[in-house]
Image: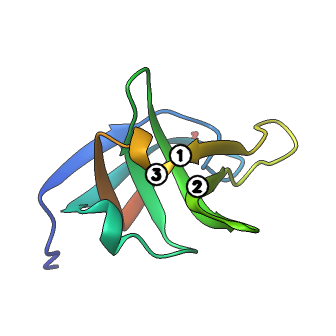
């Protein structure tokens, strides 16, 4: 298995995990804000938090992203300004650890 990634981190968040998942190992590649593509998953460092979400465009506003969780019923969308992003990594691959 070869993955062109910069770092691997373990995430315990339930916002982006399927039911029955205890944790996910995320294979991350550093990218610039300009290289972010709608529909992909990213780990995004903001001034006050770090979040793992899928990104979507905000209708009518090119300067913002809507961060979307897998479990949208429990985790509402987050709207951020692109200028708030301090660092960003694209999720290249992920490996789920299931609850036993």
Disc 3, SS: helix
Q: Are marks 1 and 2 in contact (CB under 8 Å)?
A: yes
Q: Is there CB contact under 8 Å for labels 3 and 2? A: yes
Q: Position of residue 52 (x, y in %)?
A: 48, 46
Please count the marks in the image.
3
In this view, 68 is above or below 59: above
Position of residue 37 measured from the top left corner of the image (x, y, whole percent): 46, 76
In front of the other: 40 or 26: 40
Kindly identify which residue carries mark 3. Answer: 82
Question: Horizontal and vertical percent for residue 23?
Answer: 47, 40
Q: Secondary structure at mark 2?
A: strand
Residue 67 appears left or right of 76: left
> What residue is pinned by disc 1?
81
Q: Residue at x 66, y 44 (%)?
A: 79
Callouts 1 and 3 close, C-beta under 8 Å: yes
Question: What's the distance in space between the residues labelled 3 and 2, CA to CA?
Answer: 5 Å
Q: Earlier in the sequence, mark 1 or mark 2?
A: 2
Q: Which of pointers 3 and 2 lies earlier in the amino acid sequence? A: 2
The quadrant of the picture occupied by the N terminus is bottom left
Mark 2: give few (<14), some (14-19) or many (20+) Cα within 10 Å.
Answer: some
Which residue does the image show at 80% across and 48% down from the upper left?
72
> Which percent across, then down, holds residue 18?
67, 53
């Amino acid at each position: 298995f070869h993955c062109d990634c910069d770092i691997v981190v373990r995430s315990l968040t339930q916002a982006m995990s399927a039911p029955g998942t205890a944790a996910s190992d995320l294979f991350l590649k550093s990218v610039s804000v300009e290289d972010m593509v709608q529909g992909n998953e990213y780990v995004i460092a903001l001034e006050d938090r770090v979040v793992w979400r899928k990104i979507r465009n905000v209708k009518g506003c090119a300067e913002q992203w809507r961060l979307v969780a897998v479990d949208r019923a429990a985790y509402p969308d987050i709207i951020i300004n692109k200028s708030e992003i301090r660092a960003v990594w694209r999720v290249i691959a992920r490996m789920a650890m299931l609850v036993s």
